[in-house]
Amino acid sequence: MKGHQFAKTAAILPWKRYAIASLLCALSLACTGTVNRQSTLTTANASDTEPNISYGELVFPQQSDYFIIPVGLEGDGKSSKSVFSKDMYRDSAYDRMSLMTIYNLIFHNRRTGESHLLLSENTLISSFHLINEENEAGEPIKNQFMFLEVIPEDTNQDGNRDRQDAVIGYIADASGKNLKQVTPDNTQLVFWQIDKPLGVLLLKVVQDSNNDRKFTGEDDISFIKVPLNKLGIGPDIITPEMRQQINQRVKL
């Protein structure tokens, strides 16, 4: 009888072990599932966190009492990175600055201690460049102007502010004052150049002529001329009469 009793008990024990193992496995899976959900939430929250404010390397314009401190975001993957003249920085500083998305510039007067921001409201600065005044030999004497390209909004509403949106041109003096808009709203600046002998700023822009909030080959192109001694939004070189004739396509 005792032997039979032992055999019966031994037969029951593996079943109990299986039940216990199954229960532990179920509990383990439940715990694992909970951890994964928490990790997903953490990752989602981390991705929504705004990047930290970053201050760029100092810029020292030639023959100026001011130096410039770029202000922006570092490591923001959603916005396009800012572009600037490479001669502003040594190579290592340029590499660090190329990671920034700049949205304002601090101008500090080294003599008086006065500081001010270039823009009254923060906006994405796609690029900024210092424009030199030259002597008769063509050598730079001092920085006369700063030219900026800004992206004020997500024009095409694709969730990103980048060069596919409206890009507006601005110009200021080397002290970061007298900021003037030089291209119309709702246009995309694609090219600009200084005609130094004549003291004229030439700009090529794409208009959103079909009002679809996008800038494509279907839109009109304008060429704008702005005198440097009278800054503002200049006239289109292509007159309405010229554009009307241009739009009458030649049959090939």
Image (cartoon, rainbow, N blue to C red):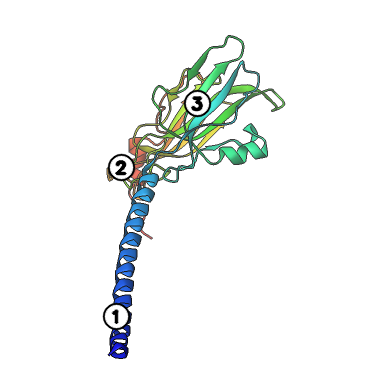
Mark 3 or 2: the one toward you: 3
The numbered mark at residue 15 is: 1
Circle 1 SS class: helix
* Mark 1 or mark 2: whose residue is earlier in sequence: 1
* Mark 3 or mark 2: whose residue is earlier in sequence: 3
Q: Can residue 196 be seen by looking at this rendering?
A: no
- Residue type at the position of mark 3: Leu
Circle 3 SS class: strand
Question: Quadrant where the N terminus lies?
Answer: bottom left
Give the answer, above or below, for where 7 lies relative to 178: below
| Residue named by callout 3 | 105
In this picture, residue 59 sits left or right of residue 150: right
In this picture, residue 136 sits left or right of residue 225: right
Q: Nearer the viewer, residue 142 or 32?
A: 32
Q: CA distance from mark 3 to mark 2?
A: 32 Å
- Residue type at the position of mark 1: Trp
Q: CA distance from mark 1 to mark 2?
A: 79 Å
Q: CA distance from mark 3 to mark 1?
A: 74 Å
